[in-house]
Amino acid sequence: MTGRAASEASSPYYTPEHAAFRETVRRFVAREIEPFATQWDEAGTFPRELYKKAAAVGVLGLGFPEEYGGIACDRFYRLIWAQELARAGSGGISASLNSHTIGAPPIVRFGSEAMKRRVLPPILAGEKISALAITEPSAGSDVASIRTTARRDGDHYIVHGEKTFITSGLRADFYTVAVRTGGPGMGGLSLLLIERDTPGFTRTPLKKMGWWASDTATLHFDDARVPVENLIGPENGGFKVIMGNFNDERLGMATGANGFARVATEEALAYARLRETFGRTLIVNQVIRHKLVDMLQRVTATQALIELIAWRVDRGDYVVPELCMLKNQATQTLAFCASEAVQIFGGAGFMRGAKVERIYREVKVNAIGGGAEEIMKDLVARQLGW
């Protein structure tokens, strides 16, 4: 949008280094992703080589420790990456290409040094893929109800159960998996690193409303034997690890959702300036201009909230209620902008291949994944003592 570069130049959050990084990432997305987004969406996948290309421009390692191949940076670099990646208009590519941002952080924070040195460098180099496996057929947002079990047998855990709706579920190499090692409730949960070739571990692909380019799967563990040294963090101490991971995921999802809302707004504006009806362009009509202003207003307000909360997270502030509200704010902004963009496009917005059509199909997954909208509201109320 006009004025965006100027506003960032005078922002307390962004530096010239941020601006240079944005230009690098924008060129990468325009060259390596955007021209192929429709093709990859229809194919239901994208080339594995894209991970290595992304690593080469320095985006896979953002925020990860340098000793394992990461890049030390503030959170605004990750915001920029999410926003620029959204320009391709494919949430499926964004989800799978960034699945390591939810799969690998528990390893960084709680994995053994040997595990970190073995697993993190190839993930951050784009050579291996990381996934997070929490959700089950009977347990989604209610993490404390997880049923997949891991029974200790000598120097192994015997894992039995299922996970579902797992992003990068088919082709990931390393899975960070929530299992029950103890009694019922949150106190009996642990995290295990499970590798793709583990005997007794199989995967079934899933077809979805949106995010077609992202491989999504149900994972099956039929008495899979996992070495004890693959335990991430303390046994029966996994619940706090999972909750902490959710906070980062929600900020990332909010940033991406608002990025897609901005793309829908920009696409609708460009179309309204070109499309002629009754002898004049759509943008001349007051009702269309007002739609676009409403869209931009919501995107701008949500972006301001994202940046404030990102700054507070970097300071170490406790912002769990704000993160929950932010996720809902961002996904509701996306829902509004995607719907209005398709309306402005008319029949052209209903056709496959248009960014706004793809974004519209991907609205609901954002309002469900990482904690459903209703769960977010309940968490806010409980955090505030209501």
Image (cartoon, rainbow, N blue to C red):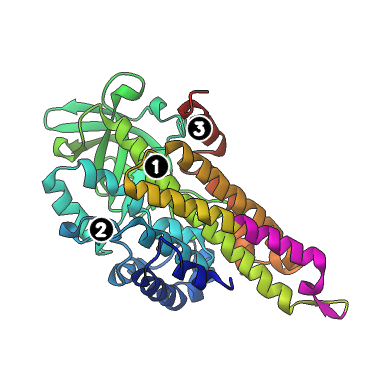
Q: Nearer the viewer, mark 2 or mark 1?
A: 1
Instruction: Please name whichever residue, 203 or 81, is drawn nearer the observer in this view of the structure.
Output: 81
Q: Secondary structure at mark 3?
A: helix
Which residue type carries mark 3? Val
Please give the name of the residue rendered at 35% of the width and 56% of the height, measured from the top-left corner: 75
| Mark 2 neighbour class, 10 Å CA radius: few under 14, some 14 to 19, many 20 or more | many
The residue tagged 3 is 380
Residue 164, which numbered label? none
* Amino acid identity at mark 1: Asn
View extreme (top): residue = 183
Query: Does the stretch in magenta take in 281?
Result: yes
Mark 1 surroundings: few (<14), some (14-19) or many (≥20) residues within 10 A: many
Q: Position of residue 41 (x, y in %)?
A: 52, 64
Identify the image quadrant of residue 190.
top left
The dominant secondary structure in magenta is: helix
Q: Which residues are magenta?
A: 279-298
Horizontal relation, residue 281 to residue 385: left or right: right
Residue at the image position 41 percent from the left and 71 percent from the top: 22
Q: CA distance from mark 3 to mark 2?
A: 34 Å
Residue at point 45% right, 70% down? 9
Which type of secondary structure does the marked residue at label 1 adopt?
helix
Q: Which residue bears the numbered disc 2?
A: 123
Q: Three-letter amino acid code at disc 2?
A: Ile
N-term mark: 2 or 1:
2
Is residue 88 highlighted in magenta? no
Quarter of the image containing the N terminus?
bottom right
Q: Position of residue 58 (x, y in %)?
A: 30, 68
Q: Could you say whether the residue bearing mark 2 is in a helix, strand or loop? A: helix
Q: Is residue 26 above or below residue 240?
A: below
The dot on residue 247 is 1
Residue sitting nearer the eye, 366 or 46: 366
